[in-house]
Amino acid sequence: MNDLFHPIMGKALKQSECSENFFLIDTLILDLIAYKNAIFTQDWFPYRGAWVHFLAHEQVKNYLEIGCYEGRSTLLAASLFRDAKLTIIDLFVDPEAEVRFLANTKHIQDRISLLRGTSQKRLAEISDKTEFFDLIYIDGNHFYRHAMMDILGSWPLLKTGGVLIIDDYNWDCDEFEDLKPKKATDQFLTAYSGAYEILFVTNQIALRKLKPEAAMFKVGLL
């Protein structure tokens, strides 16, 4: 999938092999398993079948999620990675969504560490967990500054060989141009060229970390 993105050439990512219909069977099977008895009011995660297709064999023991809303992605991770501990960060600006999240994830609450608050604050509090998480999913505030801070704050926490997924990379919504994390993501991809490989691209982009952050820089030089 590496040929789908050329940051130096500035070409857009294609989705020909990663359409929603391509993962339809995976999605249907997943929904029957992961979302039994769950109640959702929104489905902002249509390409979840890609997780089954590309990530089902990942060895995930520690999972970090930024932005959980009603728990759809949390339940997906819990179902795919049955031995994983789930660290969830959310501000819960919608109290009703928090109620639904807690109800939907009640049966796995012993696996969840729920950190309420902003991602900037919470990521700083766990910044000592360098190379700790096997998979990190970012679906927080989409404004440029917040998206960039989430990406840069999460990358050092991700194990070498781990996977970082950024939601709404290819969000097709001109009305909310400033709410797209694509600009921040593209700048990160350019700056960290050689430190990752692209696993898949849907409306999300998934990156495998190839080298620790320290290897990207000459540490100790002014």
Image: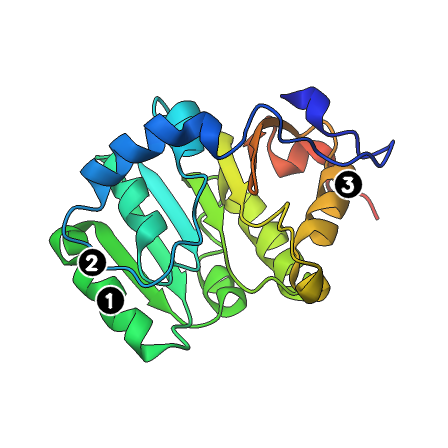
* Residue at the image position 34 percent from the left and 41 percent from the top: 62
Give the residue pinned by disc 1: 100
Measure the C-alpha gap from mark 2 to mark 3.
38 Å
Where is 127 relative to 170, above or below?
A: below
Q: Earlier in the sequence, mark 2 or mark 3?
A: 2
Label 3 packing within 10 angstroms: few (<14), some (14-19), many (20+): few
Measured in 3D between alpha carbons, the distance from the residue under mark 1 to the one under mark 2, in whole angstroms, is 6 Å
Foreground of the two, 130 or 89:
89
Q: Is residue 47 above or below residue 59?
A: below
Q: Which residue does the numbered mark 3 point to in the structure image?
A: 191
| Mark 1–mark 2 CB contact (< 8 Å) | yes
Does residue 53 appear anywhere in the picture? yes
Which of the two residues, 172 or 117, is positioned nearer the viewer here? 172
Q: Residues within 10 Å of mark 2 (few under 14, many from 20)?
A: many
Q: Nearer the viewer, residue 215 or 77?
A: 77
Q: Are marks 3 and 1 in contact (CB under 8 Å)?
A: no
